[in-house]
Image (tube, rainbow, N blue to C red):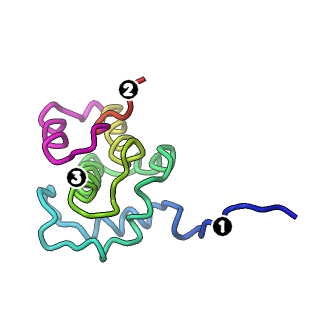
Amino acid sequence: MTLGVWKPASEQSLSMTGLTGLLEQLPVDALQSLEGLTADAFAVQQRWIKLPAQSWALAEALSLDQISQLIRFFTLAEYHWAGWEAGKLSPVIPLVAQLKQRDAFDAAFRRWIKTNTDNRYLPNGAIL
């Protein structure tokens, strides 16, 4: 007999359908605050915040604006909503890496992230 930890697949996996569903729940314009949004409405997405960085590779298929919106959402959610703390596992880190790979991450966006977080690992992750 083997023992292990049961993890419901629907709660632990990330899909393109899930990402596009999240983006549809967010405003079209660049997110500046969570006004009008409640943590309860994003319970499924809260389970994503500590997924391994490689899980976010599927976001490469998204546009730059969509990736930026996800970064804004997860930055603000972690800062403002209890239970959303992700530390060095934050999805912001692999999403920022995707923007950097496309040469689309600038100093202004870096400042925005630093202004809207108390997570010392954002936006670049843990330093070796």
Disc 3 and disc 1 in contact, CB within 8 angstroms: no
For residue 127, the mark is 2
Question: What separation in Å lies between label 2 and label 3 (alpha carbons)?
Answer: 22 Å
For residue 21, the mark is none
Vertical position of residue 35 compared to residue 113: above or below: below
Write the start and end of the magenta stretch as one range: 102-121
Give the amino acid type for the residue marked by disc 2 in the picture.
Ile
Q: Earlier in the sequence, mark 3 or mark 1?
A: 1
Q: Position of residue 17 (x, y in %)?
A: 44, 66
Q: Position of residue 121 (x, y in %)?
A: 32, 37
Horizontal side, residue 13 vs residue 50: left or right: right
For residue 6, the mark is 1
Give the amino acid type for the residue marked by disc 1 in the picture.
Trp
Q: Who is closer to the viewer here, 105 or 3? A: 3
Q: Earlier in the sequence, mark 2 or mark 1?
A: 1
Give the amino acid type for the residue marked by disc 3 in the picture.
Arg
